[in-house]
Image (spheres, helix red, strand yellow):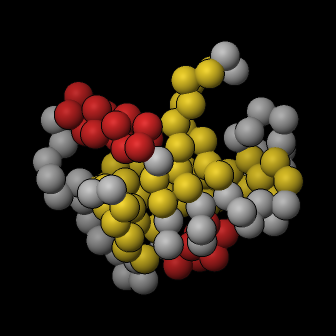
Amino acid sequence: MIYISDVAKQKVDSLKNEGELGEDYFLRISVVGGGCSGLTYKLDFDNEDQPMDQVFEDKGVKLVTDLKSFLYLCGTTLDFSRGLDGKGFTFVNPNAARSCGCGESFAV
């Protein structure tokens, strides 16, 4: 399962409204190679299902990931920070053994 915090849900809803995206759009979460620690997160709005997609819904938000990314994301919560370090989406990932100082990448 992949989860979303209340604050992140509000931000996702706001972005969908600003972009005038229809109800058929969902949040696609991926893990790709790169960054200081080797793996980075990628977020996109999408409206096309892919073979082997893993589909979850939390707090009314449809969260979709590919099977390979799900191996790294299982149990992760998508959050949104408005702190002094900057604002943006963050990932609370119990599978990450370490992350880089900027919080943009992780390793397992």
Q: In this view, does 5 lie to the left or right of 41?
A: left
Residue 79 screen position, x and y as percent: 53, 43
Residue 7, by quadrant, is top left
Residue 52 screen position, x and y as percent: 42, 83
Residue at the image point whose x is 34% and y is 66% from the top: 57
Residue at the image point whose x is 83% and y is 42% from the top: 100
Residue 84, by quadrant, is top right
Residue 4 appearing in the image: yes
Residue at the image point whose x is 74% and y is 66% from the top: 95
Q: In this view, does 101 lie to the left or right of 58?
A: right
**Residue at the far top in the pictured view:** 84
**Residue at the far bottom in the pictured view:** 52
Residue 15 screen position, x and y as percent: 31, 34
Pick the front one: 47 or 94: 94
Is residue 26 shown above or below 11? below
Residue at the image point whose x is 41% and y is 58% from the top: 28
Is residue 16 shown above or below 4? above
- Name the quarter where the C terminus is drawn: bottom right
Residue 50 screen position, x and y as percent: 35, 74
Q: In this view, does 9 lie to the left or right of 68?
A: left
Q: How many marks?
A: 0
Residue 38 appearing in the image: no
